[in-house]
Amino acid sequence: MNAFERALNAEGLTVSTIHGKGRALVAAKDFLPGDVLICQEPYASSPSKSSTGSSCDGCFSTTNLRKCSGCRIAWYCGSACQKSEWKLHQLECKALSSLTEDKRKMLTPTIRLMIRLVLRRKLQNDRVIPTTAADNYDLVAALVSHMSDLDEKQIVLYAQMSNLVKVVLPSLEVDLREITQNFSKLSCNAHTICDDELRPLGTGLYPVVSIINHSCIPNSVLVFEGQIALVRAVEPIHKGDEVVISYIDTAATTETRQNSLNHYFFKCSCPRCTKNPLEELKEVAILEGYGCKDQKCFGFLFYKAENKAFTCQVCCHSRDQYDINRIENEVEELSAKAASSLSTGNLSEACLLYKKVEQLEVNLFHPHSVKLLGTRETLLKVFLDLNDWRDALTCCKLTIPVYQRLYQSPHPLLGLQYYTCGKLEWLLEQTEDALKSFTKAVEILRITHGTSTPFMKELFSKLDEARAEHCYKLSAKDD
Ligand SMILES: C[S@@+](CC[C@H](N)C(=O)[O-])C[C@H]1O[C@@H](n2cnc3c(N)ncnc32)[C@H](O)[C@@H]1O
């Protein structure tokens, strides 16, 4: 057993090979929901381009930023982050400073991630920074690259990106083939680093987390505390079970999920992807299909070509295809207008248009449709931006049954949605409801997010406040 396997074993984990999947992380002991399986710093990371254009290289924060005076590319929120990044940025800064304006424009987050990966390897080789069993380039070298699955166009693109890395780092002996392969590795191994509320902040390569395979019914979840990746069990995991996370948003039909997994070059064969054909048709009809004419009926519709109509499989009501197409065209037209109002910052107009889209979609789609869910998620953000708490709450509540249906295990998105409901109910002085929502949020988020972060502490204090207020109201009523 090598040092890495010993280190994993100490955490109750082991690496196995599973036919058709390659390496897999397997539990060597039992884990309970909420247990942390892996806690890892990235081998390399880079912030994504934020909406404001920049974020701190150390913590990805977007506030109080100051540009590095040397390269004028890296940003830091303060001296702590600047210091923690300095050993690596010292080399990066020198390289970036000498770039022409044209080349600077080509420094996408992925190119920067690769530059940082190459430099970190150099720092470890030169023993400027330490290597450990779980933090060394051998683990990057062991990652799958799927080079042989790439098409010509993709290989050429990665090769061009590798050339740019060589141009940025002229003093290093850069192996172009290896860098090209590493770009391919990033595509199927890197993870999007998100904040507590799952907003994307950057990208990181975590070679131990990258041993974990995908399932659309995962038993674990990947979350981040700053740049630290944490894999937590969301289901009981028994000794010998494979540890699986989801690489994608699983709120979609099998076909959509499989398409989202294309760049990982495998076909998921989890129980959700291989359910019986009738169950599959039913799922498509619910998530992407139309709703029953009788809006109180939650039935799903199948198409009958001979009738040119969709028939409810529960109450047998039929909907005319022509009628459906007409509403669909209207939705498409209004959605485009709404998106354009939103992108130009005209919130009130966007709000009006999205409300119309939602009304049409309620009439058109199944109540658990992912399209309707998407519209309501956008509408919720718009209501929140407009400080329209009442409508935001109504909208947020409507999304919850859909999330419950889509995510069976404790899922951060469902927990966060309860949290939003709770905050809105609290603002609207609906104390009892707020208490219920905060309690539900805690039930889920303590499993996915742990209990010790400032984010969770804030949730706990909101729950305590709601509990105290509720007790006070009850006792006032008794008096
Ligand atoms: C992040 S890596 C996971 C570890 C990988 N199995 C290995 O050997 O290093 C992602 C790759 O693993 C494989 N993989 C992940 N989940 C899979 C699954 N459910 N079924 C088959 N292959 C899978 C695919 O080749 C995918 O590109």
Image (tube, helix red, strand yellow):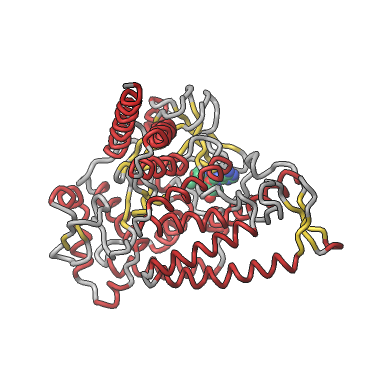
Can you give x and y, in whole percent of width and height, for residue 464 in the image? 30, 29
On screen, residue 383 versus residue 171, left or right, reads: right
Nearer-the-camera pick, 328 or 305: 328
Quarter that holds the N terminus: top left
* Residue 138 seen by the camera: no
On screen, residue 358 versus residue 305, left or right, reads: left
Q: Quadrant of residue 311?
A: bottom right
**Residue at x 38%, y 42% (from the top left corner):** 425
The quadrant where ligand 1 appears is top right
**Residue at x 37%, y 61% (from the top left corner):** 110
Can you give x and y, in whole percent of width and height, for residue 262 in the image? 57, 56
On screen, residue 277 versus residue 68, left or right, reads: right
Can you give x and y, in whole percent of width and height, for residue 242 in the image? 54, 33
Can you give x and y, in whole percent of width and height, for residue 264 in the image? 54, 53
**Residue at x 52%, y 23% (from the top left corner):** 239
On screen, residue 176 versus residue 80, left or right, reads: right
Nearer-the-camera pick, 339 or 18: 339
